[in-house]
């Protein structure tokens, strides 16, 4: 399910993708490797970031539908060979 993500982080410069993926996985009861975030942009002055996220039902669906470069970012190049 594609979605726009707004992250409020006052007092912090930015939030790592891994932390956002973990929160989305808990919220939507999905596995961590079935959640992909990308395109995160921090607003001028900090405190808020906006980006995109995709949550897949299964690993097989994620492997089939997701772009290869995003799969490499999440799982590492060794597992895809």
Image (cartoon, rainbow, N blue to C red):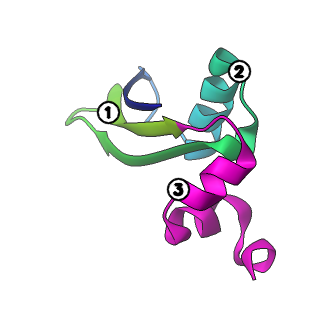
Residue identifier under label 1: 50
The disc at residue 26 is 2
In this rendering, the answer to whether 9 lies above or below 34 is above
Looking at the rendering, the stretch of residues picked out in magenta corresponds to 55-81
Count all numbered tags in the image, as a single digit.
Answer: 3
In percent of the image, x 49 and y 39: which residue is there? 54
Asked whether residue 14 appears in the rendered view, the answer is no
Distance Cα–Cα, label 2 vs label 3: 22 Å
Q: Residue at x 51, y 70 (%)?
A: 69
Q: Secondary structure at mark 2?
A: helix
Mark 2 and mark 1 lie on one chain; the one further toward the N terminus is 2
Whether the magenta-drawn stretch holds residue 76 is answered as yes
Which image quarter: residue 45? top left
Q: Residue at x 52, y 56 (%)?
A: 65
Q: Secondary structure at mark 1?
A: strand
Query: Viewed as shown, does residue 57 lie left or right of 47?
Result: right
Is label 2 or label 1 in front?
2
């Amino acid at each position: 399910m594609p979605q726009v993500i707004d992250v409020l982080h006052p007092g912090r410069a930015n939030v790592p993708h891994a932390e956002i993926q973990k929160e989305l996985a808990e919220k939507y009861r999905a596995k961590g490797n079935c959640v992909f975030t990308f395109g995160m942009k921090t607003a001028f002055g900090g405190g808020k970031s906006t980006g995109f996220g995709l949550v897949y039902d299964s690993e097989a669906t994620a492997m089939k539908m997701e772009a290869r470069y995003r799969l490499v970012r999440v799982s590492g190049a060794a597992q895809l060979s």
